[in-house]
Amino acid sequence: MTGQNDTSPKRPEQAGSPPPPMVPIAPPAPPSADVENQTPAHAQTTGTGFGVPGILQRWKKEESLRRGSLALRGLSTVFSFLAFIIMASNKQGYSEDFNKYEEYSYVLAIAILSMLYSGVQAARHVHQLFTGREVFQRRTSALADFIGDQIMAYLLLSSSSSAMPITNRKREIQIDLFTDSSAAAISMAFLAFVALALSALISGYKLSSQSYI
């Protein structure tokens, strides 16, 4: 009996001993903290995803505008050249000569001026497309294109309008090679006006979309 009492565990002493000190444990971080830490990276990725396509789309739009402007200036050059050639060769002996009419001489002079202007502008756009370099500053080029296109378009329309009445009067009397050539030259000048008018719209859009920052 005595041996059994000596070998038994001393539960009363363990029960009466003070409990071990409690070590404070920090609570786990709330999920909102992880979300807040991940938000900047997510926002940065999202911004980059939307920014790159926007830049690419803007580059494609600018490239399309350049090509469209080049095509219109090329057409204006061709139509102006045809108006110049047809009117300069519009001579039917001494009786019928375009030099006798101020309206036809006006058409010839504006056709030459339009041909030179459109040709120089087309060459500048070709240089820009192949080299990727601006001859002048972008804002200066856009302003010069907008003003120049409007002036040349007005002059072409003015010359065509001034020569149209006399051509109609002569065609009412007699239709011959001289009147047909005059009408053809006027038509070419008017088509050159249409091309430059559309080019002026593109130039105006490019000028309005320029950044002044």
Image (spheres, rainbow, N blue to C red):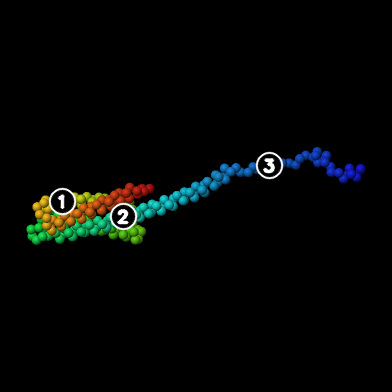
Q: What residue is drawn where x is 16% and y is 55%?
A: 183
**Residue indicated by mark 3:** 24
Q: Which mark is residue 210?
A: none
Q: Quadrant of residue 135?
A: bottom left
Q: Amino acid at mark 3?
A: Pro
Could you classify mark 2 by the number of other residues whose Cα lies within 10 Å: few (under 14), some (14-19), or many (20 or more)? some
The residue that appears at 47% across and 49% down in the rendered structure is 47
Which residue is the site of mark 2? 68
Is residue 67 in view? yes
Q: Nearer the viewer, mark 2 or mark 3?
A: 2
> Which circle's residue, 2 or 3, is located before the other in the chain?
3
Q: Which residue sits furthest right?
A: 1
Classify mark 2: helix, strand or loop.
helix
Image location of residue 100, percent across then percent down: 10, 56
The amino acid type of the residue labelled 1 equals: Met
x then y, percent, for residue 98:
12, 57
Secondary structure at numbered mark 3? loop
Q: CA distance from mark 1 to mark 3?
A: 100 Å
Q: Is residue 180 above or below residue 31?
A: below
- Res. 116 visible in picture: no
Q: Which residue is mark 1?
A: 164
- At a point 18% along the width and 52% down the height, the residue shown is 160
Asked whether the beta carbons under mark 1 and mark 3 sit within 8 Å of each other, the answer is: no
Please report whichever mark, 2 or 1, sits nearer to the chain's N-terminal start. Answer: 2
Give me the C-alpha separation between circle 2 and circle 3.
74 Å
Dot 1, how many residues are within 10 Å of its Cα: few (below 14), some (14-19), or many (20+)?
Answer: some
Mark 3: few/some/many CA within 10 Å (<14, 14-19, 20+): few
